Amino acid sequence: MTTNPSDSRAYFFKIDTTMKKIRQSLQKKLDDAQLDITVDQWVLLDHIYRSQKNGISQNELAEMTVKDAPTVTRIIDLLVKKGLAERSMAENDRRRFNISLTADGEKKFHDAFPIVAEVRRKGWGDLSENDYQTFVRILDSIYNNITG
């Protein structure tokens, strides 16, 4: 039996543990700032905020965040309950709801973004732009290998 060097390298474990540490660090900072949102809620807030002009559906959010539809629905329900997001029927498709941020949701985004940026900066440290390009290329390659 032939083996590939990647067979014995648990690179996915490194990715997973790194992501868990980033999430833990970000959640602690969000909690310390008393923003009353989770990392998962932030991820959806961020995507909704960036899609405000065109609107975004629950299915698009699920696809963009690689979360299943029930999980996205649950998170959106929480954001709506907190008054941070709202659902409205899409003009061209009555089966589709567009999700948008309320004024409070936009404020929450702007309050949380500096904290998210701080965690990103800390994690990135003194790595270069070239490091970033290489990192993204490798992650994209792994992602495409798994999904393709």
Image (cartoon, rainbow, N blue to C red):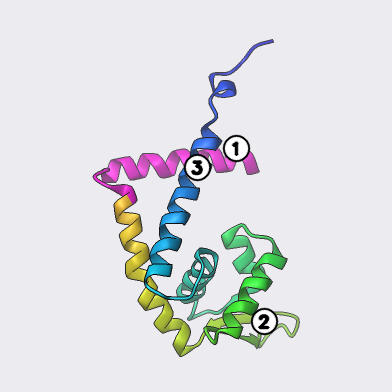
Q: Residue 88, percent across and down? A: 64, 88
Residue 117 as seen in the image, left or right of residue 78:
left
**Dot 3, how many residues are within 10 Å of its Cα: few (below 14), some (14-19), or many (20+)?**
few
What segment is highlighted magenta in the picture?
123-148
Please name the amino acid that badge 1 sits on.
Answer: Asn
Q: Main secondary structure of the magenta part?
A: helix
Outermost residue, right side: 95
Residue at image position (57%, 60%) is 65
Residue 91's place in the image compared with 47, above or below, is below
Residue 74's place in the image compared with 5, above or below, is below
Kindly report the distance in space between the C-alpha atoms of the residues bearing marks 2 and 3: 35 Å
Q: Residue 26, percent across and down? A: 42, 60
Residue at image position (74%, 85%) is 94
N-term mark: 1 or 2:
2
Residue at image position (29%, 41%) is 130
Query: Could you say whether the residue bearing mark 3 is in a helix, strand or loop?
Result: helix
Please name the amino acid that badge 2 sits on.
Answer: Phe
Q: Residue 49, percent across and down? A: 46, 76
Provide the residue designation for mark 2.
97
Residue 49 as seen in the image, left or right of residue 118:
right
- Residue 143 part of the magenta-drawn span: yes
